[in-house]
Image: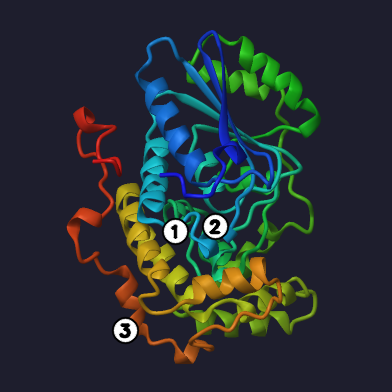
Amino acid sequence: MAQEGRNIDEQVVVGEQKGSVEWAILKRTRQLNTTASEEVLKLAEDLETWEKDDKTKLIVTQSAGDDVQMFYDGQFSSLNDIYTMYWLCYHIHTYKKTQVAIVDGICNFGSASLMFAMKFSVVTEKIDFATLEASLGFHTDCGFSYIHSRLPGHLGEFLALTGTRLNGKELVAVGMATHFVPSAKLVDLVARLWSLDSGDMDVVRSTIEEFSEKVELDKDSILNKLSIIDKCCSKESVKQIIQEFEAEGSKEGNEWVTPIMGFLKQSSPTGLKINLRSIREGRKQTLAECLKKEFRVSVNILRGTISNDAYEGARALTIDKDNRPGWNPATLDEVDDEKINLVFLPLEDDIIELRIPETEDNRWGGKYET
């Protein structure tokens, strides 16, 4: 599964074990921590082993970051890589044993989908989370059409379309994370988790709560604008949503809308339309249905089925860094809604479709190897 010319030492899952606690640290030495192919496969193998091991009671994972350049240079665009990532997302969402995710930095794209799916997600004041995919011509994938569609009101559409950042307190407030722990207390929290000999949910919860703080939103938090967000993002189309934000932004006291408009107007028109549809479909879909849909969309986007915006976005924002993506089509009006339908259609070969285990006997079946 590793790509030729890559050094596996650059991207590894560092595993440690003490008693009944297993610790997985997603670590990359040369770049910001990522969720690339070797990490995904190693973490999948470890989680499978630990879930079947009667001695293992608690799993703790630490990670932050992602690297969109992988989509551009082919390091994370093979079918095997994408398939394994989605397969792992499903298993983390439905994992049998107690998991704790500790996130203390940037957490976007794939890494966010793995960390926020765990039973306990501990975040700090250093976390920086956003779904920025629309600015790259991509879509909110790896389970986020399921996660975002279950946020309060139309906050899910807002986050998927505008790339607005949430801090640790905000993530806890909307239910994407379970606990806010100041970064300075993490060393003590880690020591306490290491000392546990239990995977009991109540025991783990009470242990984390010893170090967590009650969340109080800052007065300028975007979550204090939910009434306006709901009004704008409940509109039928992306174009209507943008028009509503423009109207709100012209009102006194709504200066916070200006950067949102900037993101919307700079993002891929195709990506915006795909994101809006995916989040809204997610409200009526199960986790498995969302993942199967997202896998189809990811494959079709990376194949350039209707547009090459995903590669153009990566080039402009992370490779050449000229911040001048040449979207094609260039405007919302030019994006054919009938073509948007094409990226949501079942793949031509059923064997390629994401295979979600349908019975407990086949829980870890359906890996890309089979």
The type of residue carrying mark 1 is Ser
The type of residue carrying mark 3 is Glu
The type of residue carrying mark 2 is Met
Quadrant assignment for the C terminus: top left
Is label 2 in contact with label 1 (beta carbons under 8 Å)?
yes
Q: How crowded is mark 1: few (under 14 residues within 10 Å), some or many (20 or more)?
A: some
Distance between the alpha carbons at the discs numbered 3 and 1? 26 Å
At horizontal 74% and vertical 82% (from top left) the residue drawn is 251
Residue 36 location, x and y as percent? 52, 47
Quadrant assignment for the N terminus: top left
- Answer whether residue 164 is visible to the viewer in this image: yes
The residue under label 3 is 338
The residue under label 1 is 77
Q: How is the image coloured?
A: rainbow
Q: Earlier in the sequence, mark 3 or mark 2?
A: 2
Front residue of 334/347: it is 347
